[in-house]
Image (cartoon, grey):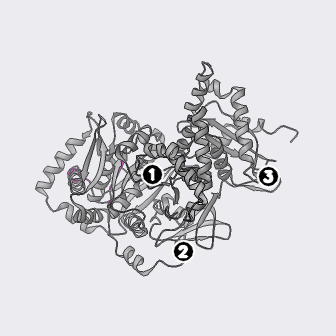
Amino acid sequence: MSAAPVNVAERIANRPVSVPAALRDRVAKSSSIEAFRFPDANEQWHSLTWQETLSKVEALANGLLALGLEREQRVAIASGTRIEWILADLAIGFAGGVTTTVYPNTTADEVQYILDHSESRVVIVENVEQLEKMRQTGLEFDSLILIDGTAEGAVSWDDLVAQGEAYAAEHPDALDEIVDSLGLDSLCTLIYTSGTTGRPKGVELTHGNWTYEGTAMDTLDIVTENDLQYLWLPLSHVFGKCLIACQIIIGFASAVDGRIPKIVPNLSVVHPTFMCGAPRIFEKVRVAVLTGNKGIKGQIARWAFGVGAKSRPYRLEGKSMPALLKAQYGLAHKLVFSKLHEKMGGRLRFFISGSAKLNAQVQAWFYSAGLTVVEGYGMTETSAISTLNDPRTPLFGTIGKASPGTEVRIADDGEVLIKGPGVMRGYHKNPEKTAEAIQDGWYGTGDVGEMDAEGNVTITDRKRDLFKTSGGKFIAPQKVEGVIMANCPYLSQIVVLGEGRKYAVALVTMDEPQLLAWGEKRGLKADYAELSQHPDIRESIKGFIDRANERLDRWETVKDFAILDHELTVEDGQVTANMKIRRGKVAETYADVVESLYPKED
């Protein structure tokens, strides 16, 4: 790919040298402007300006110094997405520490490994439940800080602030000295990738990585300081963390609430202009519309989306629709699409999907209704956003072009390689793995992809997930899974397998609320396990899979499947903390089930 324009390159080269420096720059520009919005226990929303945010962050940072935090000492955060997570993370940076992220749903065994490997001796926990999990690790801690409530042996949130205020009075220049000493190469964050195989690796991300991400996004002019983001993504994940860096550099505000059931209700309360999410969120919205409208309403909705599909080529190319189609689309919007827009808050300009592949059918469905969903792409090792599909000119099915300042190329074996200021410093305490992953500055993503003449990248699958049938055909399971999920609104999870076999098969789980509603409607008093094995359910899923197979090449089609009587879970080790399926573990656990899908005569 060609080098970035000089003005963009200069902006990236002259970006803030650290996250604290970036926040102070933002306060200098926007002190009285809203930075964050967040709910309290009574669902009342409150607001913080940039100046108020900085004041809270500095008080917490001084509190950490009062507890004895030293330079580059690791501080773990085990909490869901909430305003305190953000304030704590920024405070750790101001105090010269390094944030270690821990998913709240991470198993105790993996928590013990992460804290021990990172040498995190200070931990900030959300509640007593997380506090107890820390104590179960058997590790010794210098300090345990509790966000909600109080507990013996833990520093409360309010006490940390009080200690910080007292420390600042005695050491007024302490934070300035630390912030002035930070540079682009200073370590900022340790994110442990919950890999689908083996122990997680600690990814070292610097202050320069984060300020690059924010500056690169700023140069694209996709979002501005006038935007309002709805932020629900896990901040333990690189995508969520990256969005905070973008916010500080660009200056937009964020409404913060990590409770997934509250996403749709909150959208109509806070009226955001954009939101980022994982594919499953968009799939669930689509499922709710597809399965929620029955009778006349269902017929009208199907007609409206049919009209929307006909309008797509004209709107994508910026052309005028024929008069009749234009009138039909106006009526479809009034009867159906406007209600969907209202549920989303009425002001959404676009969604960005990341962390897993989004099926182009889902994107097209949303666009039919006048809602744009585009994909971004990156890894923990590349600080999240390495490519982005521009919502002003969406190209469904691709992850867009490389971010300004980042280079992307396709290796001879099809692997996507990334080079640029977003690439990690390395794997923590693992120089061998670092050397394997980064060669001549190029990070090997492990994903297989293609690039068109304009530089738009399409991801096919994970390199290690590709499998070859006994007939010699390669199958990309994530592609097949995406097509099936897009065509079957009742599924929750799917794993396509078939290495060395004659054809591909699938293990699937059902969307529990949809399944229970189906049973209730038919007067069946049964639980998930029983209903999932009902013959009518199997027949229905077979019909959806047959329809999905029509969109696949012959050798990719799923010839048989099994419905599991329970979901794959983190606790069983079949799913990672960020909900990625451990394909090998699943294949091993359900080997007998898989074998039953291949009759002996085959």
**Residue 74 in magenta?**
yes
Amino acid marked by disc 2: Asp
Amino acid marked by disc 1: His
Viewer-proximal residue, 89 or 488?
Answer: 488
Residue 117 image point, x, y percent: 43, 51
Q: Which residues are magenta?
A: 63-76
**Residue 477 in magenta?**
no
Q: Element at badge 2?
A: loop
Can you tell which of label 3 and label 2 is closer to the viewer? 3
| Residue at point 82%, 52% (across, down) | 470
Residue 423 image point, x, y percent: 47, 66
The answer to whether residue 505 is left or right of residue 269 is right
The answer to whether residue 389 is left or right of residue 469 is left
Viewer-proximal residue, 86 or 40?
Answer: 40
Q: Is residue 398 visible?
A: no
Q: Residue at label 2?
A: 440
Residue 442 image point, x, y percent: 54, 70
Residue 237: numbered disc: 1
Give the class, few, some or many, for how many residues have Cα within 10 Å of label 3's Cα (few <14, many ≥20): few
Viewer-proximal residue, 292 or 202?
Answer: 292
